[in-house]
Amino acid sequence: MSMKRLESRTALVTGGSRGIGAAIVRRLWSEGAKVHFTYRAAEDQAREVIASCGGAVSASALDVTDAVACEAVVDEATEKLGGLDIVVNNAGIIRDGLFLSMEDTDWAEVIETNLGGVFRICRAACRQMLMQGGGSIVNVSSIVGELGGVGQANYAASKGALNALTRSLAAELGPKGVRVNAVAPGMVRTDMTGAVRAVAAEKILERIPLGRFAEPEEIASAVAFLASDDAKYLTGQVVTVDGGLSLLGRR
Ligand code: NAP
């Protein structure tokens, strides 16, 4: 008898209405997990994601900068799913701009969403995971967190700190049975990269050894691996999924 890899596992995914998050929701569901996901405002797209999973997943609105709402969503997901084995922190934003003219709000929104949001969701989720005796957290970072990026000081800082948060939680929670890892995508075909792909696709493609952008599903497969027992001896790792882009460094 063959069992699906994530059969009977319970999973919460933030930012599941579009792009990489939507692909993660579908992948975890197709591997047998019970999934609840969040979206900020895109209710129609959230509905489409639910439909694409045959109505078998659920969703609720959440702004991850809202501490009270983060606690509430973790409680809601835990109750609905009957536990919380897997958390994928995927919600993230960019507010790109040159550093000298970067507004305070562009700095704060990116840090509060990409880093603060993960802190708040993890703190709430870990309480539940410790009560259950374990769990697996996967954070969606970026290669920019290691490399830095022109016009992305806020975003790079948020993702670099997210990598450090990932390693710290892994060290602190490993003894309690909670694994914490991250994936660091390069350039993925989503709304987030639409503008830069429109103006600089050729230049970017030249720097990607595999010669193309990633599909969201190619990030989701790494997330599913890290969430699963196939990765049960991996913790504190940032797994780069970038077609080789970071091999050539920042240029
Ligand atoms: P996307 O298409 O722009 O989707 C972003 C998702 O996050 C949406 O579901 C959005 O909800 C949600 N979201 C945004 N702000 C939120 C908030 N304050 N609270 C809760 N949810 C919020 O982005 P993506 O390209 O799929 O990126 C997903 C993750 O991958 C991000 O962490 C991003 O930094 C990372 N990443 C992306 C790339 C890339 O090339 N695309 C590369 C490296 C890393 P709504 O739909 O309701 O707005």
Image (cartoon, rainbow, N blue to C red):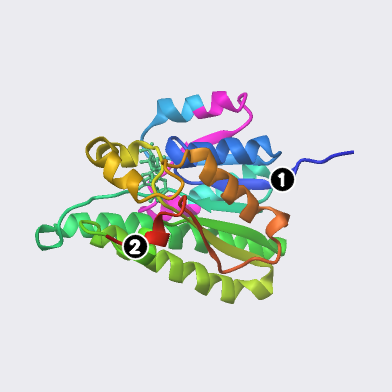
Q: Is residue 212 visible?
A: yes
Q: Which mark is residue 158?
A: 2
Front one among 42 and 18: 18
Q: CA distance from mark 2 to mark 1?
A: 30 Å
Q: Is residue 116 visible?
A: no
What kind of residue is marked 2?
Ser
- The residue located at (36%, 35%) in the rendering is 41
- The residue located at (57%, 34%) in the rendering is 58
Across and down, in percent, residue 81 comes to 66, 43
User: Which residue matches tag 1?
Assistant: 6
Is 113 left or right of 50, judged from the image as shown? left
Classify the position of ligand 1 by quadrant: top left, top right, bottom left or bottom right: top left
Across and down, in percent, residue 8 comes to 74, 43
> Relative to residue 195, is residue 64 depicted above or below?
below
In magenta stretch: residue 69: yes
Is 116 left or right of 128, judged from the image as shown? left
User: Quick one: label 2 or label 1, which is nearer the N terminus?
Assistant: 1
**Magenta part of the protein: which range?**
49-71
Q: Residue furthest left?
A: 101
Front one among 185 and 20: 185
- The residue located at (81%, 41%) in the rendering is 3
In magenta stretch: residue 67: yes
Q: Is mark 2 within 8 Å of ligand 1?
A: no
Across and down, in percent, residue 198 comes to 25, 35
**Quadrant assignment, res 113:** bottom left
Identify the element where label 1 is drawn. Answer: loop
- The residue located at (48%, 46%) in the rendering is 14
Quarter of the image with the N terminus in it: top right
